[in-house]
Image (cartoon, rainbow, N blue to C red):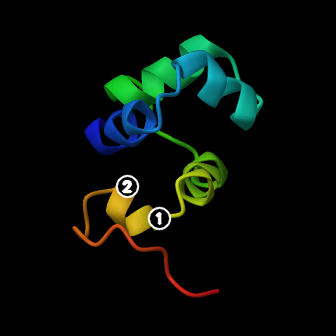
Amino acid sequence: MERIRNLREDADMTQQQMADLLHINRRTYSSYETGVRGIPVDILCDIADIFNTSTDYLLGRTNNKKAYLK
């Protein structure tokens, strides 16, 4: 998913750093970014929290990067 990769790169993070934060293997994370594998909802929510954005933004349903109020 391009938006996830862009957010990671904008934060100067490696795929390994993201994988470590998510407690998953780097290859698994890489497959999420490339779209080879679907992202489980819990991981998608964790990624949104890491980048303080919404899952809708990550999924391309909105162009608004702001996270929703909890």
Specify whether 23 is left or right of 57. Answer: right
x then y, percent, for residue 58: 37, 55
Instruction: Name the residue located 62 percent from the left edge and 46 percent from the top edge.
Output: 43
Identify which residue, 21 or 39, lies in the foreground.
Answer: 21
Specify whether 67 is left or right of 34. Answer: right
Task: Name the secondary structure under disc 1.
Answer: loop
How far apart, in angstroms, are the residues tagged by discs 2 and 1? 8 Å
Q: Is residue 70 above or below residue 23?
A: below
Task: Name the secondary structure under disc 2.
Answer: helix
Kindly identify the amino acid type of the residue bearing the numbered disc 2.
Leu
Identify which residue, 37 or 55, lies in the foreground.
Answer: 55
Q: Quadrant of the C terminus?
A: bottom right
Image quadrant in which you'd find residue 55 = bottom left
Kindly identify the amino acid type of the residue bearing the numbered disc 1.
Thr
Instruction: Name the residue located 50 percent from the left edge and 41 percent from the top edge.
Output: 39
Instruction: Name the residue located 58 percent from the left edge and 45 percent from the top edge.
Output: 40
Disc 1 crowd, CA 10 A, few/some/many (<14, 14-19, 20+): some
**Which of label 2 and label 1 is nearer to you?**
1
Nearer the N terminus, badge 2 or badge 1?
Answer: 1
x then y, percent, for residue 69: 56, 87
Q: Is residue 14 above or below residue 68?
A: above
Identify which residue, 36 or 22, lies in the foreground.
Answer: 22
- Residue 53: give its label: 1
